[in-house]
Amino acid sequence: MIAYVFPGQGAQFSGMGKELYDQSPLAKELFTQANEILQFAITDLMFEGTAEDLKQTKVTQPAIFLHSVILAACTPDFAPDMVAGHSLGEFSALVAARALSFDQGLRLVTARAQAMQKACEVQPSTMAAVMGLTDKEVEEICASVTGVVVPANYNCPGQLVISGAVDAVEQACVALKAAGAKRALPLPVGGAFHSPLMEPARQELALAIQQATIQTPVCPIYQNVDAKPQTDPHIIKQNLLMQLTSPVRWTQTVQNMATDGAVEFIELGPGNVLQGLIRKIIL
């Protein structure tokens, strides 16, 4: 069985999507449509923008989404048995699985990026990469720290990202290193994604998600919140609503997909970060 997976924020690079645009009439049509929906030329930033241009949340998220879904649309014989996406990539997966239209997916991702940016400005917050400890050890240390700090991304065994208020994350990093972590380093991000501090963003995005039309996907989508295969539009929508304040259970997602028969994982989007994580999850 074939699983298609879609990357999240951080996979962007200057020039992304240019080859697709030049070689495929369908890609050119979709990129042009995206410029009209967004009311600015995101293609200029994707194809020629600097790394700094692409780091803006309002650009990064729609850019990665567009690269992923347009690549999927231009892939011959696109017929995966299951799909999943890491954080932002979940929206790409939903469009690829025909649960969301291209138009609605792009509008939701743009609304999500703007809501997250606003939430980042409410309270100083950050994330940190932790390597060399078990999930349980990281969970227990986060729970022992005063303030908001939680596991946010279960990326692969021995590699988690924690998220929360700046002071709490710094305290957790000290405790994690003392417990034997090989690394516990703050990441250059502007906010505490997938933590309770994203609640303002979740509330802002809730109406847009509730109003979106979600169809039954053509194959199961394994969602970040519970790592389980879903095809019920109502449950998919509920999980999307919880996604911003809940951890990304990527390790569990890949394990479940493999248990359910996935033998080949194809990454659609910029870069190959997920392939690296998948190799560490499925030893």
Image (cartoon, rainbow, N blue to C red):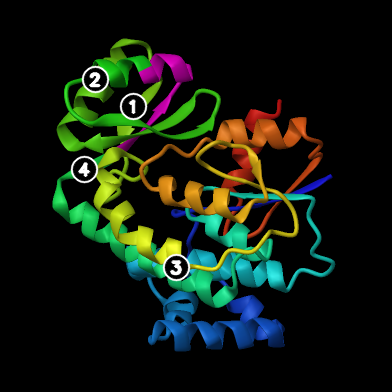
* Residue at 50%, 64% in the rendered image: 64
Q: Earlier in the sequence, mark 4 or mark 2?
A: 4
Q: Earlier in the sequence, mark 4 or mark 1?
A: 4
Q: Earlier in the sequence, mark 1 or mark 2?
A: 2
Given the image, on which type of amino acid does mark 2 rest?
A: Val
Mark 4, residue position = 125
Q: Which mark is residue 211?
A: 3
Say which of 137 and 197 sits in front.
197
Would you say residue 131 sits in the magenta stretch? yes
Does dot 3 land on a helix, a strand or a loop?
helix
Mark 2, residue position = 174
Say which of 236 and 72 sits in front.
236
Q: Which residues lie in the magenta part?
A: 127-139
Callout in the foreground (1, 3) = 3
Q: Residues under labels 1 and 3: Cα distance?
A: 40 Å
Residue lying at the far front in this picture: please name it: 234
Given the image, on which type of amino acid does mark 3 rest?
A: Gln
Given the image, on which type of amino acid does mark 4 rest?
A: Ser
